[in-house]
Image (cartoon, coloured by chain):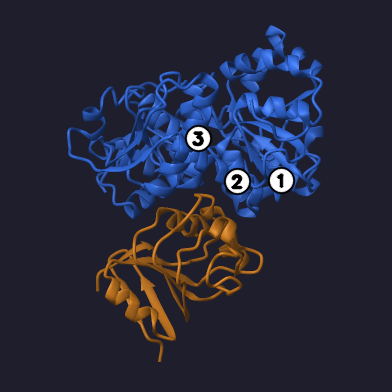
Amino acid sequence: MDLTQAERDMMQGLQGPAAADALGLVVRFAEAVGADRLLPCASAHVDGCLYHGQASLDFVERFVALGGRVKVPTTLNVGSVDLIHPELFIGDPALGAAGKRLMQAHVELGCTPSFTCAPYQTLLRPNFGDQLAWAESNAIVFANSVIGARTNRYGDFIDLACALTGRVPDYGLHRTENRRAGVIVEIVGLEDAGTDLAGGIAVAAGLFIGRECGDTIAAITGLPASTSEDDLKALGAAAASSGSVAMFHAVGLTPEAPDLDAATGGREVPVSARLGAAEIAAILARLGTVPDGAPLTAVALGTPHFSLSEFDRLMPMLNLAPFAVPVYINTGRHEWDRLLADGRAAGLEAAGVTVVVDTCTYVTSIIRDLSGTVMTNSGKWAYYAPGNLGVDVAFGTLADTMLSARAGRVVRA
Amino acid sequence: MSARSLVHGRAAGPVVKLDDPLSFWGGFDSASGKVIDRFHPQHGACLSGAILFMARGRGSSSGASVLAEAIRLGTAPAAIILLEDDAIIATGALVAQMLYGIDCPVAAIGDPAEWHSLSALPRLGIDAGAEAVRITRPG
């Protein structure tokens, strides 16, 4: 491993014992992945706030005890509890307390108490080409694909160690030659689909590349012209749920893919699939576990965390209230502050919508009635919730979910 | 031998070979040391104290936390011998070494034939150092 003088000094403890300790871990990790050197990173996003046992807490407390401070702007992923609305947590109190301490210990290290899986929305948007040490699968895909920043799939322990040192190992997606598409997925005949349908098409494309492309980067062509940044977020989240996708190119939509040649680096690349309306519908149908018409117990939106533009789309649909079943929406506390300031929070409350911040309804105990079917517009939620929560799930577009919330059963727009 | 040491340490024990890669997160219970992924062919197998042969890693990076917790609790494998490098497994073992001073050596043997023939032995010892990995049949 080829360390700079500054890195050797850090290893010797010149920047304190916590940085030295963390750098030791980064270097041994770098050796395990075959990196020859480290790179300075612009920011870190740390997914250390979900409690997986005493080791989760011991690791962070060690750096707190050593007086550690993060060396780059560092946001935090969701935790186990909603600190702003703690009454929403209905799980084991001991786990709730450990989860809360985990969140606070990270803040003591200088991490921003963002508790969001979508820090790129309102809080800390990286720049094109920035080297990052990011965890959280959807955030990794978004940063690489939609922003053109560079991160590998970092995760437990290493994300925080990179933050405490401001360094990442130089391998994988940090390097230009590893960011090119190796396979093409064509979406056929759906260029003119409207805004609401574009959300579903994006989820289907994401589920498909996750399942079929492994860690080969896909260039997706033919997505609807109406595809929004929120749809690309949903695509990446779905791809990182059904597979280990860290990056995709949406040709004509994402910054490293103005055209197919740019996405593939000019190489000849095979077309792995052509997906038309029928294939897209079949992929989405497999995501649900119940037929249309099935009664619902809740609607869950905001996985990844709902953006302000998603709230813009949702607000007119609140005219459908009263809803027959509870509607939960996960978002970040920074988005929530904006909603409070501009009066939309009051509108959501008046419509009976429960806004959940700092956490997510699929990783923790929030939804009170899990005995039936929950409907969502999130491919990620639909993918994980049956396993995590033991619920049945129905998938639909945003408009489908709100009409269904009113009807109390699965209906389509 | 074409083995790379990902996490140093020494261990010996009975060999357990997994037919499919296992995600420690969601697939392994750190309290009992057992495989709990109900789709895994060795569902229910106990990995505690074993020299675990697993071709490659799988699944969420939270697997590192689950492995570190299992090492803390004494329910983890004694060593893990991979075919391909895996950063998540290496991280879990490195962190447990850092926090608790307990070694769970991790090595990657690049050669499939060699990996398969070692995995067929009933017991093994491993000494993974900075320079080399030594694998022995305890007498």
Looking at the image, the residue that sits furthest to the top is A342
- Tag 2 or tag 1, which sits nearer the N-term? 1
Earlier in the chain: of badge 1 and badge 3, it is 1
Find disc 1 in the rendering and name its residue: A98
Chain (blue): A
Residue at 80%, 46% (x, y): give it: A93
Work out whether mark 2 precedes mark 3 in sequence or the reverse, and give the earlier one.
Answer: 3
Give SS at disc 3: helix
Q: Going 27% across and 38% down the picture, which residue do you hit?
A: A4
User: Which residue is tagged 3?
Assistant: A203
Spot occupied by residue A134 in the image (x, y as percentages of width and height): 45, 36
Cβ–Cβ under 8 Å for marks 1 and 2:
no
Q: Pointer 1: residues within 10 angstroms few (<14), some, or many (20+)?
A: many
Disc nearest the viewer among 1 and 2: 2
- In front of the other: A156 or B29: B29
How far is mark 2 from mark 3, CA to CA? 14 Å
Quadrant position of residue A382: top right
Chain of residue at mark 2: A
Distance from label 1 to label 3 (Cα)? Answer: 34 Å
Query: Which amino acid, mark 2?
Result: Tyr
Name the secondary structure under disc 2.
helix
User: Total of numbered circles in the picture?
Assistant: 3
**Which mark is in front, 1 or 3?**
3
Q: Position of residue A364 (x, y in %)?
A: 70, 42
Q: Closer to the camera, A47 or A231?
A: A231
The color chain B is rendered in: orange
Mark number displayed over residue A384: 2
What residue sits 46% from the left and 70% below the top? B79
Q: Is residue A136 visible?
A: no
Does B38 sit left or right of A69 as displayed?
Answer: right
What is the secondary structure assignment of the residue under circle 1? helix
